[in-house]
Structure formats: structure tokens, C-alpha cells
Image: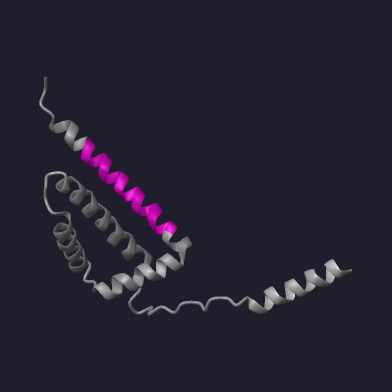
Amino acid sequence: MRKIFCSILFLIFMAACYHSAPKPTFNMALVLPADSMESLLTDVHIADGIIAVLKNKQQTAGKLSSEYFEAILKKHALSREAFEESMRYYAYHTEKLDKIYEQVITDLSKMESLVHQVSDTLKPAE
């Protein structure tokens, strides 16, 4: 009987201590639609690949990252604040971000395939 009483008391104590975190609020005026976010993230990953290649050639990655990121924001007519709010929103809504990344991966794979095709046609004949 004592074990049951202690177990019930423990459960009541745990329930009293439990509180859920408040749901975050988002400025939806700043959050990009999924298709725009997909295009933006595709560009970000392309820039990341370019920076990785140039970094290996002794270029400063920090400066390149900043320049590419600013160029991407400009291309998409997007403020840094809107980018950050969009990332925060989609990081909270992971199911939406997963769908976006499925398309980003598809787009990047198509681009990679196209680059390989062009590269193969430009190779000199042996």
C-alpha cells in the first residue's frame, strides 16, 4: 500500500512540475513561402559548394561566405531578418522543411547531372 501511495504521490508531484514550453510566434509577413525557400536554399547550397572549392585554393572562406550570402539575399530580394525568420519558422515546422529539402536535393542532383553531361562532352578526344 505504501508503494502505491508513494507512486501516486510521485506522479502528482511530476504532473505539478510539468509545464509545456510556449509555442513560438512567427512574423508570417517575413516568412517565405515553401517554393521561395526551396529556391533560396538551393542557391545557398550551391554557394556553399563553391566556397568549399575556393577555400581549398587558399581563398578566405569567411569573406567569400559573407559575399555570396549577401548576393543570394539580393537575388531573392530578401532581408537578413526575413531569411532568419523563415529559417526559424521552418526549423520549428520540420515536416515542411523536410519537404523543401526533398526538392532542394532533387534540384541539386539535376544540376549535378547536367554539369557531368556538359563536362563529358567537353572532354578532349583521346
- Give the residue displayed 16% in from the left and 44% down from the top: 56
Q: Is residue 42 magenta?
A: no
* 82 vs 11, nearest the viewer: 11
Residue drawn 86% across the image and 69% down it: 2
Q: Image point 33% across, 60% down: which residue?
A: 38
In the image, 55 versus 32, the foreground residue is 55
Residue 71 percent location from the top left of the image: 16, 64
Please determine whether, in this image, residue 47 is positioned above or below residue 119: below
Q: Quadrant of residue 70?
A: bottom left
The residue nearer to you, when weighing 126 against 97, is: 97
Name the main secondary structure of what is drawn in magenta.
Answer: helix
- Left or right position of 23 against 73: right
* Residue 59 point in image, percent of width and height: 11, 50
Q: Position of residue 63 (x, y in %)?
A: 14, 60
Residue, far right: 1
Q: Please count the marks in the image.
A: 0
Is 29 situated above or below 115?
below
In the displayed structure image, the side of residue 47 where residue 12 appears, left or right: right
Quadrant where the N terminus sits is: bottom right
Q: Which residues are magenta?
A: 98-116
